[in-house]
Amino acid sequence: MLKVLLASRNAGKLREFSELLPDFQFALWPKEAPELPETGAFFQDNALQKAEGARAWWRDHGPEPVDGVLADDSGLCVDALWGGPGVLSARFAPDLSEYRRKNQRLLDMLPEGAGRGARFVCVLAYLPWTGGAFTVSGSVEGSLAREHRGEDGFGYDPIFIPAGHDRTFGELPADIKHSLSHRARACAALRQRLT
Ligand code: IMP
C-alpha cells in the first residue's frame, strides 16, 4: 500500500481523498508544521509549491517515512468573473469566515443578466520521496445556483450545480459528487499515472 503525505489541512479535501483513494495510506500534515505557501499564478504552480514545501519539511521533521507527497490546488472558476476566484478561491472574501456568506458575496458579484457558467478545477501534484514530480488535473463544468443550497460538502459546493443535475454539490449525495467531480477526475488520472 502506498503511504502518502497529504500536504493539506483542509478538512473537506482530507475527507474526500480518504473516500476517493481508500487504498492509499495517508500521513496528515501536522498541526505544528508551517502553512504551505501558495504564491503562484496557476493551479499547477501552487500544487507543486505545496508538494515541494511539504517534502522539504518532512525530510527534517517527519515522524515516519512516506513513499511520496500529494498536494491539491483547486478552485471555482466563474465565467462572468473572468475565471475568478480561480486560483484565489481559498483567499476570496478573507473578511468573512463562513462559507455561507462568502458564497452569497460571490453570487452578488455576478452582473445582472450575466451567464452563470462555472467549473471546478483540481490540480494534483505528486512528488515521490526521491525523484521528480508530476501533475494531473480534473475539472467539472456546471453553473451557479441562485442561492446557497444544501449543507453537504464544503466551500463553494452549495452554490455549484454540476452539468446534467439540478441540485448543488451541497445537496447531492457524496457518491454522486465522487462520480464526476474535479477531484475525482484528478484522482483517477493520478491512479493511472502511478500504475
Ligand atoms: P487551495 O487549493 O488550498 O487554494 O483551496 C481551494 C479552495 O477552493 C478551497 O478552500 C475551497 O474554497 C475551494 N474548493 C476546492 N475544491 C472544492 C470542492 O470540491 N468543493 C467546494 N469548494 C472547493
Image: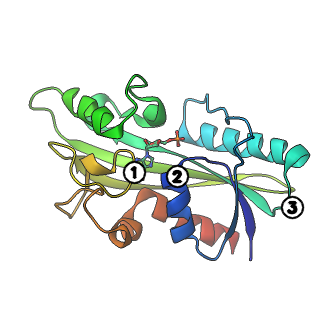
Residue annotated with mark 1: 154
Q: Residue at x 47, y 36 (%)?
A: 90
Specify which label sits upstream in the sequence, 3 or 2.
2
163 lies above or below 192: above
Using a 10 Å C-alpha cutoff, classify the residue at mark 1 as few (fewer than 14 neighbours), some (14 to 19) or many (20 or more): some
Query: Closer to the observer: label 3 or label 2?
Result: 2
Quadrant of image for the C terminus? bottom right
| Disc 1 within 8 angstroms of ligand 1 (CB) | yes
Q: Which callout, 1 or 3, points at the residue further toward the start of the chain?
A: 3
**Residue 137 visible from this viewpoint:** no
Left or right: residue 157 versus residue 110 is right
Residue at point 70%, 49% (across, down)? 29
Crowding at mark 3 (Cα within 10 Å: few <14, some 14-19, many 20+): few
Q: Is residue 170 left or right of residue 60?
A: left
Residue at screen point 26% across, 29% down: 105
Number of marks present in the image shown: 3
Label 1 sits on a secondary structure element that is: loop
Which of the two residues, 59 or 165, is positioned nearer the viewer here? 59
Position of residue 51 measured from the top left corner of the image (x, y, whole percent): 71, 46
On the rendered image, what quadrant is the N terminus found in? bottom right
Residue 74 seen anywhere in this rendered image of the structure: yes
Q: Is residue 169 left or right of residue 135?
A: left
Alpha-carbon distance for marks 1 and 2? 9 Å
Give me the disc on residue 65: 3
Is there a contact, CB below 8 Å, between mark 3 and mark 2?
no
Residue 152: give x, y in percent of width and height: 33, 58
Q: Disc 2 designates what residue?
A: 11
Residue type at numbered disc 3: Pro
Q: Which amino acid lies under the numbered mark 1 shown in the image of this protein? A: Phe
